[in-house]
Image: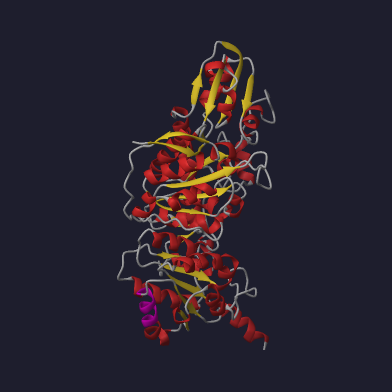
Amino acid sequence: MSKLLLLGDEAIAQAALDAGISGVYAYPGTPSTEVMEYVQKSKQAAEGGVHRQWSANEKTAMEAAIGMSYAGKRAIVCMKHVGLNVAADPFMNSAVTGANGGLVYLIADDPSMHSSQDEQDSRFYAKFANIPVFEPSNQQEAYDMTYEAFAFSEKHRIPVMLRVTTRLAHSRAGVSRKEALPQNEIKLVENRKQFILLPAIARGLYRELLAKQPKLEKEAETSAYNKYIPGEDKSLGIITTGIAYNYLMENYVGRKCPYTVLKISQYPVPTELVKRMVSECDAILVAEEGAPLIEESLKGMLDNGPKVKGRLDGALPRDGELNPNLMAVALGLKDTYGTDVPKIVAPRPPALCHGCPHIDSYALINEVMANYSPGRVFADIGCYTLGALPPYNAIYTTLDMGASITMAKGASDSGLRPVIAVIGDSTFTHSGMTSLLDCVIENTPITVFILDNMTTGMTGGQKSHAFGKIAQICKGLGIPEEHIREIVPLKKNHEENLAIVKEELEYEGVSVIIPIRECVQTLKKRLTKK
């Protein structure tokens, strides 16, 4: 393939295109901006119909990319390090849901704060979330890692962080391209509960995430990007990460360092290679761009102290809450935890209240979607999340507040038709408005249900900021008036409402349906006070 002179950001963009992405989602922020700009100008992207519009913020960008991954296609989302704070909610939760189509998070850190508020090191986020990281040392590695990261993501069904810093993002070098791959076909997840983070489901998914860690560690141990280079002088061993490897080698003629060097560019940290260096060298120098993540892990709070037991070695469980019995077991005391549960306290699954307006809304959605394959209804955080459970089984995703609209957008961008987003009135004003704005800018063909029960129901009936304002907000965001449809979700109105829903599903643009009926719990309270 051809060789191009590219910025680090441009190498990443070209690699993503060559890897067969269907969408790039981003909010501008130095030093990450050039990735999106390169794709927007790319003839290859235009011919491939790659989605390449800016998002309203980093959170909506990430949620849309997750939605595209949900639909089976490859996506990259790009932001600077502080943007990851805005996107932290979907970032952390997407580690639990995992990925379907290859999903890469390009995070550009800015040491020395050339154009930023802080020197945040994004590797801590990745370590916190338990997702793997690729950290290139040069532009060619930036290309190669990006190209391979999508397949890596699909292999382990997990999002992947690609971490670069300003110098690499904004310096140029020759880059050899690989074969351009075709885009994935739409293929929804087989496990219809994978993207629904109700607690009972999330607990199992989190255990699956933890179970992936040994496999990811093994990948790092054998990665071609992690290199152990023996040196003649064993008085010092040097651990370097990412572009710091270049900073080290530039001090030696012919890039020949006399000391043993461990170059780390794929995480989790390759523990066995670190142990080898510690056993062979008298002292260790850690040179890493950003915060001392690896250095702190090597030194530890009890450096050269006694064996440390806890959640890392299995003395205590890695997931869930602690309790006195777990502590007793860790201390070698008798396990006295009871296993018999009296029938009187048998578990009862949560359910929508009798008379809840959401029941009639889901009846509409289920009937109209019965003509299509499952997996097309994206939901949000609120009482209506219970629509994932029997007898409704109506929704297929719940990621974080506001994600329903943007995930539906990403799935629609991938070509999935039709798609529905379900969001509550309070959640809509919390973080759904920016998501809807992204849809308006591109006139994305999705149907958004904003369930207006006139309160913040799930948290106890607090006043909703959206009370009496939803239609006006949608109009202000740019939704055509004729596609803002207010309905009353009652059985007597079912056929009339069904016709409206069918009509809007056929519309090739963004439309909003607002079922309006008061929450039965707040209604009871209001009537009781009279």
Q: Position of residue 303 (x, y in %)?
A: 68, 25
Q: Quadrant of residue 189?
A: bottom left
Q: Is residue 465 above or below residue 38?
A: below
Between 375 and 176, the one nearer to me in the picture: 176
Q: How many marks do you count on the picture? A: 0
Q: Is residue 480 above or below residue 240?
A: below
Question: Which colour style is shown?
Answer: secondary structure
69 to the left or right of 318:
left
Q: Position of residue 468 (x, y in %)?
A: 59, 81
Q: In the image, what residue occupies the spot 61% across and 36% down?
A: 310
Quick one: which residue is furthest to the top in this view?
A: 232
Q: Quadrant of residue 332?
A: top right
Q: Is residue 190 visible?
A: no
Between 149 and 222, the one nearer to me in the picture: 149
- Bounds of the magenta segment: 498-506
Q: Is residue 251 above or below residue 473?
A: above
Task: Kindly report the secondary structure that dominates the magenta region of the rendered protein.
Answer: helix
Asked if the stretch drawn in magenta spans residue 504, the answer is yes
The image quadrant where one finds the C terminus is bottom right
Q: In the image, what residue occupies the spot 41% across and 42% down?
A: 15
Q: Is residue 143 visible?
A: yes
Q: In the image, what residue occupies the spot 42% across and 67% down?
A: 444
Q: Position of residue 439 (x, y in %)?
A: 47, 66
Asked if the stretch drawn in magenta spans residue 55, the answer is no
Q: Position of residue 396 (x, y in %)?
A: 42, 62
The image quadrant where one finds the N terminus is top left
